[in-house]
Image (spheres, rainbow, N blue to C red):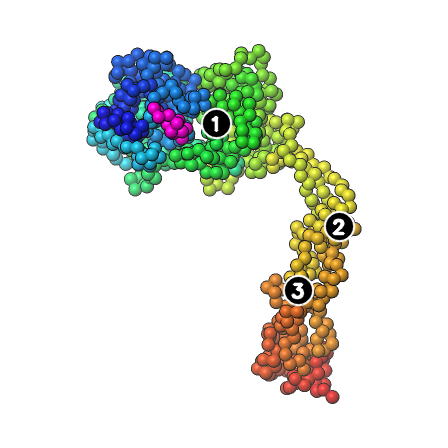
Amino acid sequence: MIPAILDGVRSHRAAVVVAAPGAGKTTRVPPALSAAGPVLLLQPRRIAARTIARRIADEQRWTLGQEVGWHVRFERHFSARTRLLVATEGILTARLQQDPLLSDFRTVVLDEFHERSIHADLGIALVKQAWIAREDLTLVVMSATLDAQRVATYLDDCPVFDVPGTPHRVEIAYRPGLPPSDACREALTRTTGQILLFMPGAPEVRRTADAIRRSVANTVEVVELHGSLAAEEQDGAIMASHGRRIIVATNIAETSLTVPGVSAVVDSGQHKVARYDAARAVDSLELERISRDAADQRAGRAGRLGPGIVLRLWDEAARLRPHREPDVHRMDLSGPVLAVRAWGGDPGMLDWFDRPLPDALAAATELLRAIGAIEGDQLTGMGHAMARLSVHPRLARILIEADGAHEAALACAMLSDRQLLPQHPATTTCDLLTGVEGELPPHILRNARELQRGFRPASRRLDESSLRRALLSGYPDRVAQRRSPGDPRVLLASGHGAVIGAESGVRDGEFVLALEVQAARRGDTSEARIRIASIVDKSWLTPTAVQSVQHVDEPTGMLRIVQQEMYGGLILKARAVKTDASREAAHLADAFLARPFPDDDAALVLRLRFAGLDVDARAIALHAASGRRTLNDMRLEDGLDWRTRQRLDECAPVMFTAPSGRSHRLEYRPDGSVALSIKLQELFGLATTPFIGARREPLLLLLLAPNGRPVQTTRDLKSFWDTTYPQVRRELRGRYPKHPWPENPWDAIPTARMTKRTRRS
C-alpha cells in the first residue's frame, strides 16, 4: 500500500489515508514520503510527538535528533539534518507566520485529523494556501476514523487510500454504573496484559488512581497519564513494564500514542470539553459523553498486540453522536484570528475546512482590539509581538505588559492550567499571589520559565500592584463591579451577572477582575462563579463611553438627567447635569414618549390616527414640552398647531351630540372603530346609525339600560328598533317604570330624564 500512496501523492500532490488502529500509518507513511524531501508530521499532542519520533527512529534505525526529531511547545530536539520533524499542530501555525510557503518542507502530514483540534483546522486552511502557491508542496491527511471523502473534496478531489489493519479480536462488554476500580479488577482477572482506563480529566484521573491503589493494594502498579504531567512523567507512564499495570489516562492516550502491552480498556465514556460563551467572554469545561469515533479509537487500544477486551461503563442502548464536534465551533477564536492576521490573511475570507460562525469571529476580533492587538483590520506592533509568543493572546498581552517578569510568567502559567486552583489566605488582593509567592507544582514552574524565553532577564521584581495591573491588560473585558460593598454578587462589564466563589480570597474592592470563571451548568438558572479574582483599582479604568440617562422622579414627574461614565456595562461615575431650555425640552419630550401615555394623550393619538393626520409624534411632544418643568405638566394636545386642531375636530370630533341634546364623549379604539355609549332613550326618533368623520365611519353604539349597563351593541340602529327593541321593552319597562318605553320609538321624544311623556306634541 505504501507504493500506491506515494504514487497518489506524486500525481495529485495530496492524499487522504484512512487506516485501522495498529496498521502503522503514522510510523511508516511519513518516513516513506521523506525520500522526496523533508516532511513535517503533525500530531495533536506533545507526548504523541515525542513518542512517535522515538519509534520512527527505532524502526528506521535513524538517530533521534538527526534524521528524525520533534518540536513541541517549549521543547525541541532536531537539527539541520532532520528529514522528518514530528511536531504539534500549534508549531505549524508559528512556522507559517515566519514562512507562509513552508519552504523548509516538501510534505506536510496532518495525522489524527479526526480530533478536529482548533490548530488542525487552522493548520489545514493555511497549509492549503501554501499548497496552492507551491507546485512542489504535497499534503497528506491521515486518521483511523475520518470522513475521508469530505477531506478529499476539500483538497481538490485527491485520492483516498483505505489501509486495512491486522486487528485482533476485541470483546466489548457494557457495565453501566460499575465503579472504574471494580471494572479494573474484572479486567485484571480476564486478561494478562496492561489495563488502560479512560477518565474525563486530570482531577478524575488522580482520584480514580488513588481509589484503585487502595483497591488492589501493592499487587499492581497504578500510574497516571494526563497533560499536566511533566514530559518525563508522561514518558514513564507509557514505558514497557515487566509487571502488570493500570494506566489511568485522559483522552491523551486515545490516538497515536501506543501504550505497550495493553490487553484491556476500561472506558468511562466521558471527556471534558472546553466551550466558550462569546457573549459573556466566559470559558467553561463541560463533562460530556464521548462520540462514537472516540469510543472506537479507545477500543482499538485493546487489540493492537493480541485479543483484548473493552469494558464500557455506560448502557449499550445509549446513542453516541457519530463524530466529535470541531473545536472551531465551540472555542475562543482570538488565538486563531491573531495567527491568521499575523500570517497576512483575513479570517473571514480564509478557506476554512469548517467555517467558524461569524459571531465567533467578530467576538474574537473585538477581544483583540480590546487588548491592543488590532486597530481597524490591521495588526498593531503589539499584535505582532503577541503573535510571536505563541500563547493565548490574553497571556501574551500580560507578559508584554510585565516585560516578561517572573511573577507575571508564574501567573500566566497558573492561568493556563485549567485544573490548578491556587490556595489563598483569608483575604487577598489577588488569588494568584499565593502561587507567585509560594510553592507551585514543577510543571507550572517549568512552563513559567519557558514563557520568559524571548524576554531579557528581569532586572526588578514585579510588585503586587504592577502584577494586578498587568493582569488587567490581558482581561480588560472581565472587569466586574460589586452590586454593593462586600457583596460577592457582581455585574460583569459584558452586562451579565456572576458571583465571587467562596474559594476566592478577594473579598474587598468595588471593582474586581474575573480571571477564572466557571460558567453555570447548562440549563441552570444560577450565575457564573468567579474562582480566581484580582482587585482592580478604579483609577486604572478608562471610560469606554459617556452616556446621558434620563430619570423621571415619581410622582412629581420631574425629569432628572444623569451623565454616566461607562466601562462596558459598568458605571464608573455618575453626576447630575443641567442643560439649556431647548435641550431640556428635548429630554422631556423623549421621556414623555418613552413612557405610557396618560389616558387623554392616548385618546388623542387614536383620534389623529382615525383622522388620517400624518404628524411627527416627537415634534408634537417637543412643542408640548416647551416651557414645561415636569412630565405631569405636559399635554400632547398642547403641541398641535391651530390647523391640525381644526382638521382633527372636523375628522375626529371628541364629542357627539345626541337627539336628546346631551353631548357624549366618543371612544376611538385601536382597531379604527369609534364607539358611543348612550342610553337608548336618548336616541328615540333617530332612524339610522350616525356616521363620524370624513371616512363616514358608522358609530358602534353601546345602547344602555337606565342602570348604565349595555343591552345591545350595534352598528345598525334601524334593525335594532325593528327587531330587538320590542323584546328589550318587554324586559325592562316593568323594572324601570319611571322611564319611557313607547311602543313606537320612531315618534318618541328623545330624553335622558325619567318622564311619561313619550309622544311629540
- Mark 1 residue element: loop
Which range is magenta?
Answer: 124-137
Image quarter for residue 480?
Answer: top right
Tag shown at residue 630: 2
User: Can you identify the residue that label 3 sits on?
Assistant: 611
- Compared across the picture, whether 88 is left or right of 546 comes to left
Q: Which residue occupies 70% across, 85% down?
A: 758
Instruction: Please state which amino acid type lies under the numbered disc 3.
Output: Ala
Q: Is residue 288 above or below residue 192?
A: below
Residue closest to the eye, 535 or 50: 50
User: Can you identify the residue that label 1 sits on?
Assistant: 344
Q: Which residue occupies 48% across, 41% down?
A: 524
Question: If you read the primary sequence from the N terminus, does the residue marked by circle 2 or circle 3 appear first?
Answer: 3
- Asked if residue 528 lies in the magenta stretch, the reply is no
| Pair 2/1: label in front | 1
The image position of residue 381, as x and y in percent, is: 55, 23
Label 1 crowd bin: few (<14), some (14–19), many (20+), radius 10 Å: few
Image quarter for residue 239?
Answer: top left
- Mark 3 residue element: helix
